[in-house]
Amino acid sequence: MIMMSKTGSFLFISCLLLWCSACSWVDDDRSGCPTGCWVKLSYTYNMLDVDAVTTQVTDASIFVFDTNGICIAREEADSISLRHGNHMVKLPALPEGDYDILVWAGLADNHYQYMDTSLLLSRSETGEQPDKLAALFHGRTDGEHIDENYRVIDIPLIKDTNLFSCVLQSQTGNALESENFDMEISASNGRMDHHNLPIGNDMVVYKPFFIENTALENISVIHAGLNVLRLMENDDTRFRLHHRPSGKTIIDIPLTQYLLLTRHAKTFKMSPQEYLDRQDQYNLIFFLTASEKPEDPFLCQQMMVNGWMIRLNEAELEE
């Protein structure tokens, strides 16, 4: 039989009472214990495999659907409440049952319009989107059983916005002027369903939200920034570069397929879609060579994507 001294018994009882009182369990008072159902957001689906939710997610909208697909609750969390709550959001009291939970983070930006079955990206009457977009994230879990017990539901997020830094660089010393070039990315992703998939052929023409002329050691350069929503492995996204004075299209390529050419040894085991979802920044450099033909003033035979050189005339892909 194990014997315990009076001093040991006193310490044991004291620790037990301290543990109980930490949750206010003395006299059956549980007011200090966590209750209800909470959603915890995380963002680790990136190239670094680290949780960047605290630095990238600034607001969240959480939608709860019943088994009939009807939205019965919506909770909003701004940056302050997310930060104070460790990116956990408490759901309202719900009858016991099974529910689907949808998260869109970034809806505070007025470029995104939540609808009953989809999310719509605003654009001009001509279908153009030239603005800097706030980061948009999606998360979803289905068939979650919720009752009166305390529970935390983890919902990992996928980032839907991609940033493109595009550079036009002269190979022959000819000056490049931004007003002579029209740059765009077209994609059928203007409307996303609640499972984060593009709906139909809702085309958006993304234009630069900034463009500037500069020179690097006497090399003429044009630098532009563009945003694009979620890219899909077999989509019809295209990058086009037009020369305004001549009306010539210098570049017209299936962009997503060229981006996937840059998967290297470290990321090759990722599926194409995982790579596109994890990678959210792309640096594109197009090397322009001037010709002597007024009707065909520039050629582009090489491009660089995130440091990888691609010869356009040798890496032609099926459209």
Image (spheres, rainbow, N blue to C red):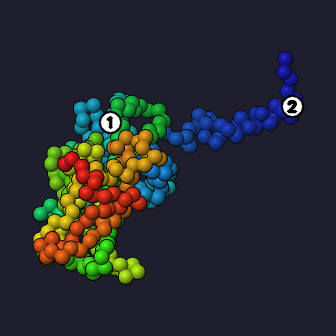
Q: x and y percent of residue 220 in the render?
A: 32, 78
Mark 2 or 1: in front is: 1
Q: x and y percent of residue 198 in the render?
A: 22, 46
* Vertical placement of residue 282 versus 24, above or below: below
The residue nearer to you, when weighing 85 against 204, is: 204
Q: Quadrant of residue 208?
A: bottom left
Q: Which mark is residue 6?
A: 2
Residue sitting farthest toward the front: 292
**Left/right of residue 119 with respect to residue 271 in the rendered view:** left
- Residue density around tag 2, few if under 14, some if 14–19, many if 20 or more, within 10 Å: few
CA separation in Å, label 2 and label 1? 55 Å
Residue at the image point whose x is 27% and y is 80% from the top:
174
Task: Name the residue beneath numbered marker 1.
Answer: 100
Residue at the image point whose x is 70% and y is 40% from the top:
18
Q: x and y percent of residue 77 in the render?
A: 39, 54
Residue 43 visible in rendering: no
